[in-house]
Amino acid sequence: MPAELTELKVRDVTIKLHRAGRGRTVLFLHGAGGVPQWLPFFDALAEHRFLVPKCADCGDYNWVPYPACRTCLSENQVWTEVSGEATVFTYTVVHRGPGAFNADVPYVIALGKLSEQPRPCLVLGTLVGSDPAEVQVGLPIQIAYEDIPGEDITMWRWVRL
Ligand SMILES: [Zn+2]
């Protein structure tokens, strides 16, 4: 994506590049909340709660949302609030970001393993407020929320516990 591109419309979803506070860049899908099956997630996110589809048949949590449970293929899933507590499952430190993201380097993208069980549920997000040199697998982290100024959108972030 060219650095000067700040907005791209694809069907009913607008992809926006937004300069957030503290010199960070965020990319979000404006209007994704208009997709009916995602509404419970975005409504909860605006209230700073994180919902994950939980299988009503086998009890496993599934992220990212998908029409069927990844364990038993049941379509009987229920949006369920999770604690947001996790540990770093794996991560990468970005030293050369694409486009406007290059102004934010170095930054950490982490795959967090939620504390909810039985099967590990992995959520991808930016880990903020940490020295990349101190990040390691197993580090306790927590989902945090950031309301984007001037936009009706809330982003989730990883922060250290
Ligand atoms: Zn299942």
Image (spheres, helix red, strand yellow):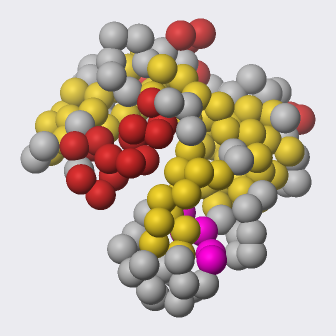
* Residue at the image point whose x is 44% and y is 86% from the top: 74
Q: Please provide percent x and percent y for residue 19.
A: 43, 15
Residue 108 in view: no
As drawn, is 138 to the left or to the right of 60?
right
Residue shown at 79%/27% (left/top)? 130
At horizontal 74% and vertical 75% (from top left) the residue drawn is: 118
Between 128 and 148, the one lying in front of the other is 148
- The image shows residue 133 at horizontal and vertical percentages of 86, 34
Q: How many marks?
A: 0
Residue located 48% across and 59% down the image: 79
Q: Is residue 21 visible?
A: yes
Quarter holding residue 113: bottom right
Measured as percent of width and height from the top left, residue 139 is found at: 87, 46
Q: Position of residue 153 (x, y in %)?
A: 38, 27
Which of the two residues, 82 or 152, is positioned nearer the viewer here? Answer: 82
The N terminus, quarter of image: top left
Residue 158 in which image quadrant: top right
42 vs 146: above or below: below
Q: Quadrant of the C terminus?
A: top right
Residue 84: in magenta span: no
Asked if the magenta segment contains residue 60, the reply would be: yes
Of the pair 9 and 148, the residue shown nearer to us: 148
**Position of 83 compared to 157: left or right?**
right
Specify the segment rendered in magenta. Answer: 59-64
- Above or below, 52 against 99 in this view is below
Q: Residue furthest bottom?
A: 72
Q: Nearer the viewer, residue 62 or 106?
A: 62
Magenta span: chief secondary structure: loop
Left or right of 49 in this view: 110: right
